[in-house]
Image (tube, coloured by chain):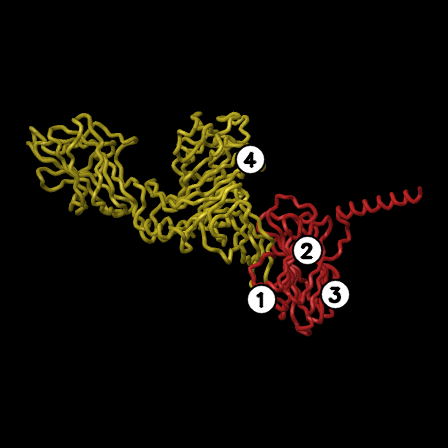
Amino acid sequence: MCPRPVLFTVLLSCLPWAASAGPITYAVTVDTSSIFGTAGSLDFNFNPGPLVTQAASLEILTFTSDGALAGGCPCGTGDVSGQLPATLTFDNGTGFNDYFDDFTFGTTISFDVSLYGPALSAPDGTSTSGSTFTFSLFSDAAGTIPVLTTDTTDGFAFTVDVNLEGTTTVSNFSSQTSVQPASSAVPEPNSLILMGTAMALIVALLRVKLL
Amino acid sequence: MWRPFCVLAVLFAQSLHADVVVANTLGPGDTYSTSWYPIGFEINPIDGNHNIGHAAPFTPTATYTFTSIILPIGRVTPPVSMTLTLAADASGLPGTPIETFTITSANTYPAPLLITLTSTLHPQLNAHTQYWLVAEAGSPTLMAWFVFGSTSSPQADRQDGGPWILYSNTPAAFRVMGTLELSQSCVAVVENAVSVSTSDQGTRINATFTPNSGLTLSQATTICAFSNFDWEQILTHLHDPSPFYQPDNTHLTAASVPFNDPPLGGYAYCQSDFGTPCNEYPFYLNPNTLGTKLSLSNYETPTHLSFSDSPADPCLPGGNSQGIQGCNGINAPGGSFLAFTTRLLGILPDGTLVPLPDEWTWTSTYNGTSGGIATTLNFLPVDPGSGTGSVTITSVNGIQLNPVPSFQVATTASGLAYSRVSQTFNGTVTIKNVGSSGINAPLQIVLMSLTPGVTLVNATGSFVGNAFITSPLLGTFGPGQSSVVAVQFRNPSNAVINFTPVIYSGGLN
């Protein structure tokens, strides 16, 4: 979340991301080489706020790692479906929507986080709470000892807030973790206008040449 | 709960502020009959002339601090010179004087006068202990102490200062007043035991009395020597035009306040909404019926007594007052509101009301309807979309609060991230001054109607049973300015966390 009352300003980055007509997707890569071979755990959760929250959903896509998932699921609580490494789908319909799995770390983890739904595509202007996604890594199976994060209080590697105006904000507490906007598959309205303008220009030039 | 008011509670621990009736033999409306007991020098051709004293007993049902006596006295033979003594009991007869009053003014018989004698010593009157009111006068004065009723009760006379003689006759009329002395054990049960909150987007006010120390309501009533607990609500501010009527078509207006809610006789709308007139006066809930909409028992569990109200008044500014009796398209002036005082009561076995220190005042600006009508004394939710406005708690136990109007501050919140390390749901609450003027800090964010079982781990304190957290902002909260406050919830059942935010300016302690 952003802002958070922590002092790790060097690592902390709060990156608001522009509204999009389609999903907002982040490509996540974690360098886990420093904890290679550790039998730990991973946690993902996506929860609404305490006031009036507009519906939103989230997917964890293309999970890839040379580490090993325990696979002793069910691992989900609340509105979560799927099982890693396949796609996980969350929504913010209950108070606690969580996926937690044992994991033996390899050298890297990567996945995409894709956020979508009315809260992102059509903010209603009347809701008063956003939603928040968190990702955490732990060096124990119980999920009590966070690793690869400076946020030792809460243990988050990074969080993504869905804001009331449909934007998102990333807060990254992990120097080993990269959270980068992924390219959107659906052109935004502004892009469409630009494309339309370009096409019209090309057509006009062609007409000039033909004349 | 109500921790901030513990100092006040200590004051209340000794006695309650309201005068209540300790004992009464006057008739309804302080009436009395034309018969009387002679006090003083009586010329009697049969028994001879004697100086007569008369005494009437009373027995408090609870322990009180004595404050005053009211009694009908007339002068038969001047001069007016009479004493009235509050005396202890001695083997069923008047005993040691406790406090003596001198009466030097009275109307001439047969036009008696209700005389009020105010205590200066304020002795304690113990529960279930008999006391006497002893009237005597010296020669040549003869006074008349008037009686009421037709049933006999123990009375005592004596002649010329001799021994008291007990007999049975019509009771001398009087009323003894006092402030109730709650036992320490009762105080421990009831003080700071009421939580108050708002819900339903701020249109409903709720309260719950939960006896302290894990006691049941039944155990609490036993300890306090009450027959019941109940609520009392008084409408203290009403606007014109008003939509409220009594069943006899009496229009309740701004000039009618203060009056009990419900008033004596009830409201006109209760006829249709409640099936019966809501004439439970002076209680908010009716302790004398079972199974009706207003029956006290409907709002009791073994451990709780609940209260709720959602006033709906389309005559308030901005309401759709067309077709509403009383205002018929004309709304009250801008800034109008309804104001209430609500408190917890104890009811003694004889029906005496005992105001308890758990009391709060509140206002409502909700200008819609509930069940399609204008109403207070309302257990239903308001009609969605029928109006705007909300209820606001304005004082607790006499301590004035400064609520910030919802049009002046907007409250939003982030999502809640669950931490497996702290096992808490963490987020932020943001308040923004959306008004045109500054608001004095500190600002308190009160979390009304927080999901049951959820606790605010980093709360600053508790306000009438609701967690609150203080914004770190100092000085003046200017227009357009925002303040972000971190919040951390413990939520063992993983329930959806929800609350109604209410902002106060200044301290709550």
Is the residue A46 above or below the residue B404 in the image? below
Chain drawn red, letter? A
Using the numbered discs, state the Cα–Cα distance from disc 2 to disc 3 in whole angstroms: 19 Å
Using the numbered discs, state the Cα–Cα distance from disc 1 to disc 2 in whole angstroms: 25 Å
Numbered badge on residue A152: 1
Asked if the residue at tag 1 contacts the one at tag 4, i.e. Cβ–Cβ closer than 8 Å, the answer is no
Quick check: do tags 4 and 1 share a chain?
Answer: no
Using the numbered discs, state the Cα–Cα distance from disc 2 to disc 4 in whole angstroms: 36 Å
Q: Is residue B169 left or right of residue B235?
A: left
Q: Mark 4 points at which residue?
A: B387
Q: Which chain letter goes with mark 1?
A: A
Q: Point out the frontmost of discs 2 and 3.
A: 3
Q: Which amino acid, mark 3?
A: Thr
Quick check: do tags 2 and 4 share a chain?
Answer: no
Numbered badge on residue A64: 3
Q: Mark 2 points at which residue?
A: A90
Please tell me how crowded label 1 is: few (under 14), some (14-19), or many (20+) other residues with Cα within 10 Å: some
Q: Point out the frontmost of discs 1 and 2.
A: 1
Q: In terms of secondary structure, where does tag 4 sit? A: loop
- First-in-chain label (3 vs 1): 3
- First-in-chain label (2 vs 3): 3
User: Number of labelled discs?
Assistant: 4
Using the numbered discs, state the Cα–Cα distance from disc 3 to disc 4 in whole angstroms: 54 Å
Q: Which chain letter goes with mark 2?
A: A
Q: In terms of secondary structure, where does tag 1 sit? A: loop
Q: Which amino acid, mark 4?
A: Gly
Q: Which chain letter goes with mark 4?
A: B
> Hue of chain B?
yellow
